[in-house]
Amino acid sequence: MKKPQLPTNLSENLDKLGINKDKASKLLAEILDMRKKTKLPVDIDKEQPNAQTDASEQTVKQTMTSHDHVAPLRLVFLGGGSFGTAMANMAAKNGCDSTLWVRNKRSVKQMQKHRINKKYLPNHQLDETLKFSNNLAESVKDKDIIFVAVPSSAFREMLQNIAPHITGQAVVSLTKGMEKDTFALMSDIITQELPEVSYGVMSGPNLAKEIMDNMPSGTVIASESEQLRHAVQMALHSAFFRVFASDDVRGVELGGALKNIYAIAMGMAATYDVGENTKAMILTRALAEMSRFGAHMGANPLTFLGLSGVGDLYATCSSELSRNFRIGKLLAQGVSLENAIKKLGQTAEGLNTIEQVNQKAKKDGIYMPITQALYAVIYQDQAPLGVALHLMESGFRSDVEFVMPHKNVK
């Protein structure tokens, strides 16, 4: 058995840990060989579809009915940012027919020539089989699944643009956020703009650079369609990237959107050099807010204890790779909101989410003190330390009321 070449960054980490690289390489070869021989369990309904079954559901079923089919899954990833690129690359490495759609024609030519996303992932080589395009109609044509990885502000327009070319493809959102002024989640927009498609959302602690560095990571695909969940697992699951499944679309999607709020808070806290006690309190009270809000919106509160909830919350709140964490640090350093956004150079979804959630919480009477405090600091120019002191002096609350009857425990 030929031993695979270990990625440079992984090899360096093994050296630091004192792990024998030859043994690690041999183990990796055995894992990869086992994956080739093992058929993933897929429970496919073999009965004839009824008249109400979506065309997109049938596309996924037909693609997945046999593990021995010659044609690989045909996927397109719309959006050439860091995460869209990382997922498109993962699918290509797994043998899928994977295309990355990028709006800028010049960027497409650069990626085709150098196989590097110079703007977002400049230090990572992309798989030689990954395709690139800036032709939207051609990119989505005859695909099995369309993954949408554009900012929330551009999500609806993207779906409207691809609508004329939908002929049975399933749609999966990779976007974590809410639409400005409508409070619509990406799944809401999918059902509004493409009501006939089978759809899902994917979320988790997925920092793109770490995924590209082959650091063991996990994500969650949520969909009411079992076939779509299995298809995404087959497309993206690898030796370093595990894909879990859920049918709680609302909960998984809200976890991915809400955690961005608290990453901004943790970025601010890091600037003020607070202690570990403070960080732990922010994280756990953030989780309580997320679960409370999610339950109000119809999600299963226990979903927030999984990868798409506490997992994503931890990763986003503790890493300099997180855009929302970095924006929080900049704001706490006295940088204006406008200049902080310019300096970041990428979309920080948490800024819009704070506005949307604060408005919804006030309207529906949901207790969201951290969100309200951040809104006061960012959009009402209140002093951060003064707001923090006010939070600490607020009334008594129970600890885990988000999984208990809606009452205070004294």
Image: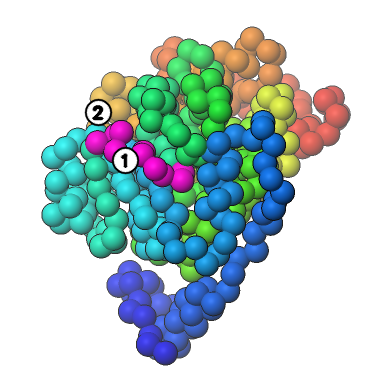
Say which of 19 and 378 sits in front. Answer: 19
In the rendered image, residue 134, in percent from the top left (x then y), is placed at 23, 38
Q: Nearer the viewer, residue 184 or 232?
A: 232
Instruction: Give the image location of residue 298, x and y in percent.
Output: 71, 27
Identify residue type, mark 2.
Lys
Residue 272 seen in the figure: no
Task: Please name the amino acid that badge 1 sits on.
Answer: Ser
> Looking at the image, which residue is at 76% across and 28% down?
397
Q: Magenta segment range?
A: 135-145
Classify mark 1: residues with Cα within 10 Å, few (<14), some (14-19) or many (20+).
many
Residue 342's label in the rendered image is 2
Per the image, label 2 sits on a secondary structure element best described as: helix
**In front: 52, or 218?**
52
* Distance CA(mark 2)–CA(mark 1): 31 Å
Query: With 50 as the anchor, is 90 left or right in this view?
Result: left
Q: Is residue 53 left or right of residue 86?
A: right
Give the quarter of the image for residue 326: top left
Where on the picture, by quarter, is residue 105? top left
Can residue 368 be seen by looking at this rendering?
A: yes
Q: Say if the magenta span includes residue 407.
A: no
Badge 2 or badge 1: first in the primary sequence? 1
Residue appearing at x 36%, y 58% in the figure? 92
Q: Kindly identify which residue carries mark 1.
A: 139
Q: Residue at x 30, y 33 (%)?
A: 137
